[in-house]
Each structure stands twice: as C-alpha cells, then as structure tokens.
Image (cartoon, rainbow, N blue to C red):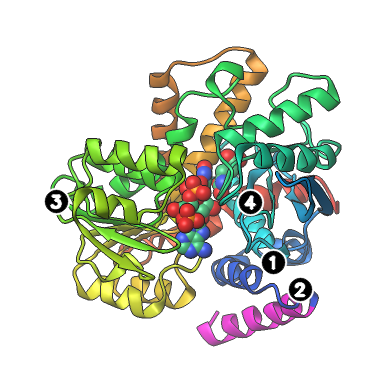
Amino acid sequence: MKNEAIEQKVNKFMATIVAKNPSELEFHQAVREVIESIIPFMEEHPIYYSERILERITEPERVLMFRVPWIDDKGEIQVNRGFRIEMNSAIGPYKGGLRFHPTVNLGILKFLAFEQVFKNSLTTLPMGGGKGGSDFDPKGKSDKEVMRFCQSFMTELCRHIGPDTDVPAGDIGVGGREIGYMFGQYKRIRNEFTGVLTGKGRLWGGSLIRPEATGYGNVYFAQEMLKTRGESFKGKVVTVSGSGNVAQYTVEKVNEFGGKCVTLSDSEGFIYDAKGIDAEKLKFVMYLKNEKRGRIKEYADKFGCDYFPNERPWGIKCDVALPSATQNEINGEEAKILVKNGCYCVSEGANMPSTPEAVEVYIKNKILFGPGKAANAGGVATSGLEMSQNSLRLSWTREEVDARLHQIMKDIHETCKKYGTKEDGYINYVDGANVGGFVKVANSMIDQGAV
Ligand code: NDP
Ligand code: 2IT
C-alpha cells in the first residue's frame, strides 16, 4: 500500500483517539507512534482489522482514579489524586510502575500504560501492561510525610491489585523508600505477604539487580546496536540526562564498558564534566540524589565542572546519547544538534524522551535509535524475574539475574531486528519494537475472544 493511503488510515484512526480522549496529548503521541508502525503491518495481516485490535488495544481495560488524603507535618490535611491504569491483561497480570510527580495526569499515565503493554510483551515474560501514580510531589517532604502519603495511597489501591492481578513498581519519584511504605501497608490491610510489588528491599523479597536493571539494560541494548556497526562503548563519549535511578546505573555500566559519561541533569539544569563521571563521583551522585535528595548543581560545586541552569545536555558533543530523565526531553532541534555533532546512537532509558520530530531526525539520518519500549525494558523484565523468584520462594544470585537480564536485552534486540530491518539493511528499531511487541498481545487477544 502507498504511503499516502497509510497516512490517511493513521490520521483517520487518530481522529477517533483524539475525539475520545481530548487533551491527553502524550497519549495521542504514543498511540500515533505505534500505529504508524502497526497499520502497514496490518495491511498484510487483515485479521487484526476484523478483530478490531486497534480499537481494543487503545482502550484501557480499566481506569481507577481516587482521592488520596493525608496529614502533613503541620497536622494539616492535604489531598492528592491517585490513579491506576489497567491497560491490557492479554498475556499476564497488569504490570508497570507508579509515578509520583506534580505533572502526573490521566493522559501521561495512559501514554505510559500503553507503552508498557508493548514493552512487557517484548521482554518475553508473561506480563500485561499497566501504570499508575499520583500528582504528589515527594520533593521537600519529610520521610514521615512520604510515609503517610504512601499509606493512604495504598489503602485505596490495595483492593485493586494482587500478585496475580496487578503488580506495581517504581518510576519517577518512586524508589525503594516508597515501595517499602506501600508494601508495609498492603501487607497490613490484606494480611498476606506476597509479591504484590516489585523493586522491594533485598531483605523482604526484592530481587538482586532490580535497582540496576533499567540502566544496565539500556547499556546492554545500546551495546547490541553498536555491535551491528562493529562498534563498542570503549572510548566513546556519552551524554546522559537525569540523575535518578536509571541515569545512575547507566553511568555505572558505561564506565564498566570503557565509555566516558560527561553529563547528568535534573529538572533545574545539567552538569558537564569533560573528565568523565568516574566511580568516585558516581558514588557522590548516589548519595546526593538518594540520601541527601539535593540538586545536581552540587556536583559542579564539589568537582569544579560546568553547570548550565535551565538547560538540557544535548548541545554537548558526544558519540552516544542516553536520555534517562523524562518524556519529550529531546526536541527536533536538539536532535539535529546531536547528529550534527557526530552522535550516531541514541538509546532511550526514559519513556518517550524524544519528540516525534526528534525521532524523524534520527531515522532520516539513519543513526542507531533504540526507542524506550525496547531499550529500557530491562527494568520491568527484572521485575518479572522478581515475580518469578517470589512465586518460587527462592532468590537467585546477582550473577544469575544479571545473566538473564543481559540475555533478555539481546533477545529484544533480535526481535527488533526481525521486524524492523528495511530493504537497505537499516534497522528501524521503532517499527521493530512496535510490531514485535504487538504480535504477541494481538494474537493472545484474538485467542481469548472479544473481551
Ligand atoms: P527518578 O525519580 O529516580 O529520577 C528522575 C530523574 O529525571 C531526576 O533526575 C529528575 O530530576 C529528572 N526529571 C524528572 N522529571 C523531570 C522533568 N519534568 N524535567 C526534567 N527532569 C526531570 O526516576 P527514574 O530514574 O526511575 O526514571 C527516569 C525515566 O526512566 C522515566 O522516564 C521513567 O519512566 C523511565 N523508566 C524507569 C524505569 C525504572 O525502573 N525506574 C524503568 C523504565 C523506564 P528532579 O530530581 O529535578 O525531579
Ligand atoms: O517504565 C517502566 O518500565 C517502569 N517504570 C518499570 C515497571 C516495572 O514494573 O518494573
């Protein structure tokens, strides 16, 4: 089918999505990106049209929205909004993180839940897709305030989730501390000790390597992409954004592979350390972000490097860029600058960090581009491994989990190659990940009837 006819079909379907889900811009963006890959594939496999798979797969199975009242340290009542999007359970229980950030709204969580369906399918593990969170801002809150919020959030959420139903985990603003408070409250109310959350503490059912998994996984995925051009991380200059969970373990693995990370950021600016963020400096970042909960600017103050307030790191010359902060953090102009400066590999640790215009620039210039749903799937894959260990009531060694994670990232790369290799040999990982993730879910939906 001609490109124009495909484009017409995409636009027609998108008009229904926009009409049904007005003002959910990020959700529109995520759906368009997926169907641009899927519709050409459906032309060859019309059963997906007659089974109305697109209409079904873009409609959440269930959306939960609830009030979260909690008492702050002054004794005053605060009210936030809680969400859980149970998007698709065709291949397993709903699975996906919780995000606590003031920007959280329905559209953002629906985009994340939608992406999660395809990502989880790519992992090869039996997990459906979901996402949740709250507009609660953990910044500036005391541990006790965070605990009271988490307890109130889980008091409502606990009736909707369970180890065979829906298994949340962390995302922006939700790490080990928050998972601990939520797990405690779930256990207390339900009177059961189960693997209802992943990213748990080591002492109470958490898997080794889960904290490292998203960052490590993204570097493993990028390494597979580099290999297709006979390259490796050795001696490469790497820009990283964010300075949270994903960014930290990205830097750790790049260092191990002999690359040099020169940037990190947070919502207030970025640091540029031309000498590289070595193990010692990374230790400081971990202390700064995970314990002191301070700003990345303090890195520049401590190590005497450059700090750029209110800017993003994409103007810094690099070979590889690993965006690891948030959605839409690289726009078309920034993508052009990256490519112009010689960057030939972008692998997304964050979810949808590149705008559609940026993705167009990567593909047009035929650089290696690993979209988030493939590149950052190591986090949820290792959550899947945590679920397996919880069910077995066993725990695997660090080496065993890491080896499984590494193999899963290699398998995801193979899937992308299988579905995304074009006639000229260029691997379009966007098409590869979208179609590869889609087939398993769509076929399972067909098997299970019109539910
Ligand atoms: P963290 O909360 O640990 O860190 C988030 C980092 O991104 C912080 O440095 C934060 O800065 C920055 N950031 C957040 N929001 C914005 C914003 N609006 N503008 C600029 N910077 C921002 O989260 P994670 O590291 O877990 O998550 C990072 C990304 O990776 C997200 O896109 C997430 O969805 C994705 N991801 C996470 C997985 C996981 O296992 N944790 C798995 C797969 C994907 P500040 O401190 O100033 O807010
Ligand atoms: O976006 C993601 O894949 C995550 N935040 C991790 C989800 C999970 O269930 O581990």
Q: Residue furthest front?
A: 74
Q: Is residue 378 left or right of residue 220?
A: right
What predominant SS class does the magenta segment belong to?
helix
Q: Which of marks 3 and 4 precedes in the sequence? A: 4
Report if residue 449 lies within the magenta region.
Answer: no
Residue position marked by numbered label 2 in the rendering = 21
Q: Tell me whether the residue at label 1 lies in contact with that at label 2, contact meaning CB atoms closer than 8 angstroms.
A: yes
Q: How far, Cα to Cα, is label 3 from label 1?
A: 40 Å
Q: Is mark 4 within 8 Å of ligand 1?
A: no
Residue position marked by numbered label 1 in the rendering = 107
Amino acid on which disc 2 is placed: Asn
Q: Please tell me whether mark 4 sits on a helix, a strand or a loop.
A: strand
Q: How far, Cα to Cα, is label 4 from label 2?
A: 22 Å
Q: How far, Cα to Cα, is label 2 from label 3?
A: 47 Å
Q: How far, Cα to Cα, is label 1 from label 2?
A: 8 Å
Report if residue 4 lies within the magenta region.
Answer: yes
Q: Position of residue 355 (x, y in %)?
A: 47, 72
Amino acid on which disc 1 is placed: Gly
Q: Please tell me whether mark 3 sits on a helix, a strand or a loop.
A: loop
Amino acid on which disc 4 is placed: Phe
Q: Which of marks 1 and 3 precedes in the sequence? A: 1
Residue nearest the observer in this picture, 222 or 261: 261
Q: Is residue 60 left or right of residue 357?
A: right
Residue nearest the observer in this picture, 278 or 136: 136
Q: Tell me whether the residue at label 3 lies in contact with that at label 1, contact meaning CB atoms closer than 8 angstroms.
A: no
Residue position marked by numbered label 3 in the rendering = 275
Magenta stretch: give its range.
Answer: 1-19
